Image (cartoon, rainbow, N blue to C red):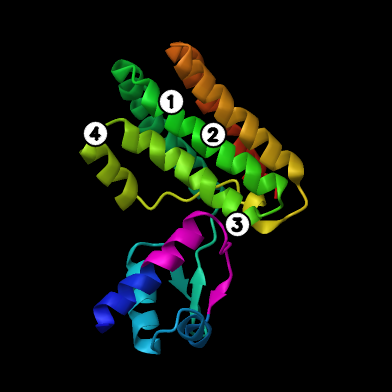
Amino acid sequence: MKNDSLSFKVYSELRRKILSNHLVSGIRLKEDYWATHLNVNRMAVREALNRLLGENLVVFGEKGGFFVKSLTPEDVKEIREVREIIELGALRLIFLKQDQKDIAILEEICDDFTTMFKREYFEGACEADVRFHEKIIELSGNERLMQIYQMSNIPLFHQKLGQTQVHMSDYEHTDEEHRKVVSALKNKELSRAEEELKKHLLRGEKASLDL
């Protein structure tokens, strides 16, 4: 496999883990570990880390090495505001389509999330959380909106999910809030869907700041 393909493999895996908070803020990304773990050479890992550095998902430490970027309170606030603007817009586009197949897809992701956290597979639950929000953007049917969302590298900011495996209430709240959004869409109640999503994002912001 060419080195650029190997680099993309590493980049995709690390980006997914960072955005789902499996790799939490401040953790060091050791080149030798990831080279062994992903069965690639260190050059591929270094190229992937430099790409993530350019996307502001990792930082270079004062004494060397790459670290997952820590979020400041201002970062968290701005992320919540950006996500609210983008995801509420996507919700409205989904509502206009009135496609019950879209609702069924979101319900399926909710079921996946429930299964994951009840089985205490917390990495899987975090990834299902990312998938839920990405799917809202995708189902809007607006490719430019999806491109903006992907290029923004918007992480989950309720880092408590990523940093601990004992706060089951966080998973339960997330599960309940996702389902309320979907239920409102299913019942053709756009205003309620918007309010439920806003409350969900605000709780995520508060949970992160309470760490």
Question: What amino acid type should be assigned to the residue bearing mark 3?
Answer: Glu
Q: Which mark is residue 123?
A: 3
Q: Secondary structure at mark 2?
A: helix
Q: Residue at x 58, y 70 (%)?
A: 27
Q: Secondary structure at mark 3?
A: helix
Q: Position of residue 171 (x, y in %)?
A: 67, 41
Q: Secondary structure at mark 1?
A: helix
Precedes in sequence: disc 2 or disc 3? 3
Q: Is residue 32 magenta?
A: no
Precedes in sequence: disc 3 or disc 1? 1
Q: Which mark is residue 142?
A: 4
Q: Position of residue 78 (x, y in %)?
A: 45, 42
Where residue 144 sits, quadrant-wise, is top left
Q: Residue furthest left?
A: 144
Residue that badge 2 annotates = 201
Question: What amino acid type should be assigned to the residue bearing mark 4?
Answer: Asn
